[in-house]
């Protein structure tokens, strides 16, 4: 009987300790429970993580490829505009030489039209048509 009373006293002390420090028990129990539950699925979790990582790397590679492609397109556009500007300057020089046209000899209206035409970002056909109109040249396409 004494051993039963001693055991009962010991269990009551443990119960009081558990009531007072229940957070510690819960904090220790959660990782243990998670380990037990996921121990069989550990391999599956690794596979899922590996697939997620591979998908992320594919997305990053696709984004980088897209960015490089956009940079290449932008570089080609800039080169095309520079080439068009050089071609336009050559055509203007040829026209001035061929018809002995000097900017000083142009009327104010023609100067304004020429400045407007050169300052705007026009296509090559629009520029050639505008130059033909300013200088009175018949252009056949």
Image (spheres, grey):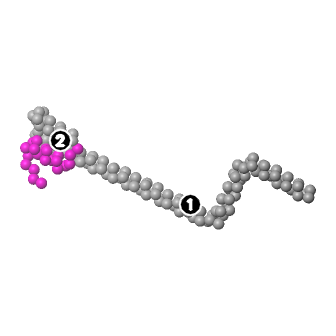
* Nearest-to-viewer mark from 1 and 2: 1
Q: Left or right: 8 with respect to 27?
A: right
Q: Are marks 1 and 2 in contact (CB under 8 Å)?
A: no
Decide which of 132, 63 is in the foreground and name it.
63
Crowding near pointer 2: few (<14 within 10 Å), some, many (20+)?
A: some
Local secondary structure at mark 2: helix
Q: Earlier in the sequence, mark 1 or mark 2?
A: 1
| Looking at the image, residue 99 lies above or below residue 107 | below
Quadrant of the rendered image containing residue 101: top left
Q: Residue at point 8% right, 46% down?
A: 137
Residue at the far front in the pictured view: 1
Q: How many marks?
A: 2
* Residue 33 visible to the viewer: yes
Q: Which residues are magenta?
A: 121-141
| Looking at the image, residue 82 lies above or below residue 40 | above
Question: Picture coordinates of residue 22 (x, y %)?
Answer: 72, 50
Q: Left or right: 122 with respect to 133?
A: right
Q: Quadrant of the N terminus?
A: bottom right
Residue 24 is one of the magenta-drawn residues: no
Q: Residue at point 16% right, 47% down?
A: 126
Local secondary structure at mark 1: helix
Question: Picture coordinates of residue 84 (x, y %)?
Answer: 23, 48
Residue underneath mark 1: 49
Q: Left or right: 73 with respect to 121?
A: right
Question: Picture coordinates of residue 102 (x, y %)?
Answer: 12, 36
Q: Quadrant of the C terminus?
A: bottom left
């Amino acid at each position: 009987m004494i051993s039963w009373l001693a055991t009962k006293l010991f269990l009551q002390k443990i119960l009081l300790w558990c009531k007072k420090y229940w957070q510690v028990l819960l904090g220790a129990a959660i990782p243990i429970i998670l380990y037990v539950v996921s121990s069989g699925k550990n391999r599956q979790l690794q596979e899922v993580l590996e697939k997620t990582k591979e998908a992320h790397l594919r997305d990053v590679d696709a984004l980088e490829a897209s960015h490089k492609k956009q940079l290449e397109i932008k570089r080609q556009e800039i080169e095309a505009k520079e080439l068009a500007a050089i071609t336009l300057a050559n055509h203007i020089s040829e026209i001035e030489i061929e018809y002995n046209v000097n900017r000083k000899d142009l009327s104010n209206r023609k100067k304004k039209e020429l400045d407007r035409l050169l300052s705007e970002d026009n296509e090559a056909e629009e520029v050639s048509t505008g130059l033909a109109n300013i200088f009175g040249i018949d252009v056949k396409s």
